[in-house]
Amino acid sequence: MAYEQHLLAGTGIGLRQPHVEHFMHGAPSINWLEVHSENYLQENSKRRYQLRHIRNNYAVSCHGIGLSLGSSDPLNLDHIKSLKSLFDDIEPKFISDHLSWSSLDGRFYNDLLPLPYTNEALLHMVNQVNQTQDILGREILIENPSSYLAFKHAEMSEPELLNQLSLRSGCKLLLDLNNIFVSCSNMNTDPYQYLANIHWHQVAEIHLAGHTIKKLPQGEIRIDTHNNPVCDEVWDMVDAYRDKLQHIPCLIEWDADIPTLDVLMNEAKKADQHLGLTYA
Amino acid sequence: MPKVNSLAQLQAYFTKQLALKVTDSSHNQKPTATLNPLELLTNLLVESHFTPEQLINIYRNNFVISLRELLENLFPVTQALVGSEYFTHTSRQFINDCPLKEPHLNHYGGYFVSFIEGLKALEHMPFVAQMAQLEWHLDRISHIYHQPNFDFDGLTQINEDQHLNIHFHLAETCYLQTSSMDLIALHKDFSEPKNTNLKGEAKEPNYQQQSYLLVLQNHQGESALMPTSQQHFAWLTGLKNGLTLAQLCNIENTDITSLMSQITDWIALGCIDGFSLRADTQA
């Protein structure tokens, strides 16, 4: 089947290095795959060759953490150029990054740092996303990050900012339900209210993942670690929003303490069941 | 309402606070009265039952731990040579002194090798930096996509009187290294459980031997370590430096027959992946 005919629909999984050989020598039954863009930037790398091979059998999306769109630094044009080269080569169905920043004064922090949800941050993100989409010649998806703190001078909620960002820049939204649950738990806000405030027609992809509960002397805080199965509370959110979610491609993310492929595929099947796409 | 002038200012406060305590020694750093990032940030954060320092620490841990894990994964034998405690200390110092300057991790390990080479504390143990260099190249070579496709037909079409003007190209998947220590034995012994004899006693290894080695990608696409002789090392270094066969013949004790036989072996191993003809270089 030609790559153009592969559809990004139903539940997919993040392609991680321990599982690559399964996809090189076979075609495990999974709907689609997502890769971390920054791991595939080198043109003559084995990983790029493997991805070219694997995309013959699967729809692929590219998810990044390096654009640092919320940073007050200028956009890193060299990085965008490398990404463009990767996207021109692989032709991913979706490309995405985050509502966050990870660099300042040319120093990178390899994490998704929090933005204040102000009008200034919104305008800055709109400008950065517009420029990025213009250079790439493609629409991008922006994902909500996990938050551990919030700023007093915020002028809007995260869903409001995401809605406005999508409306003004034409980008789509990648909604991570685990991140919503983690952020809302940490900020003591209601994840269902968050979901109710989202403009669903702008959502193009869903992420589901696990997280860790860290015990501190004053209480528990949830950390977005992607090293566990999806928790029950997040499955409850999926169930509650099934009607909206079942039409949106969904991804199981598992980035640390990576399990066997079977475990990941079962988690994807579980997602399809919760979404009403298959039956147990 | 706290005072914050801009997104840029908030990000400057945030990163200043993130950068503190990356190294153990910076515990003693005292922020100046005019720029205390934690105080400035504290005024900007919504109150929580966690302290601002605890919350910032989550972000700091995320990036410091991710970089430290990268280094631990890239340099397991180097870590075994210096011990976990010293390696952790050095990694933290490196992350602080040589911040990540790219939005990906593809080159960061290479900068760590240069950092170790410059450490005064390791001046008397140059083999530690040499091991780090070796591990870095083992990793780099394992990631390169390389399909040996030597043009034998093209080689046979070269006139015999031009043979000495051939320059054979060293593949990018081939890396040469020499050391006053037996790096291959060190690598083996420190990446595997110690050898024991029949009585269960540890053997006393002798690592104080000059070694010449090459790292190459084997036919399974994995990087592999291979010992070589001083003369073969000199020939391979000559190839790397662009020498023709005629110029290689000027290297001491070179016998053209054994050189050609060795080149055939290196082509089979994938160390040599091409050739070009140079202007007349014959003596």
Image (cartoon, rainbow, N blue to C red):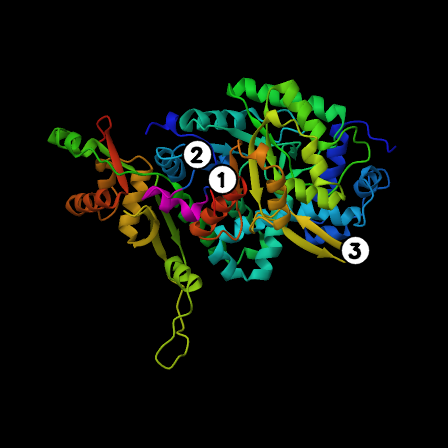
Q: Is residue B276 left or right of residue B176?
A: left
Please state the horizontal and vertical placement of residue B55, each as a whole percent of the image: 74, 47
Looking at the rendered image, the disc whose residue lies closer to the viewer, 3 or 2, is 3
The residue stretch that appears in magenta: A16-29
Q: Can you identify the residue that label 1 sits on? A: B106
At x 31%, y 53%, the residue is B226
Residue hosting label 2: A42
User: Which sits earlier in the primary sequence, circle 3 or circle 2?
Assistant: 2
Label 1, label 3: how far apart the Cα atoms are: 39 Å
Going by the numbered disc 2, the residue's amino acid type is Gln
Q: Residues within 10 Å of mark 1 (few under 14, many from 20)?
A: some
Q: Which label lies toward us, 1 or 3?
A: 3
User: Separation of disc 1 and disc 2 at Cα?
Assistant: 9 Å
Q: Amino acid at mark 1?
A: Asn
Q: Are marks 1 and 2 in contact (CB under 8 Å)?
A: yes
Of all chains, the one bearing label 1 is: B
Task: Please tell me which residue lies in front, B159 or A106.
Answer: A106
- What is the secondary structure assignment of the residue under circle 1? loop
Are tags 1 and 3 found on a single chain?
Answer: no
Name the residue type under label 3: Gln
Disc 3: which residue? A218
Examine the structure image and report whether residue A17 is included in the region drawn in magenta: yes
The residues tagged by marks 3 and 2 sit, at their Cα atoms, a distance apart of: 45 Å
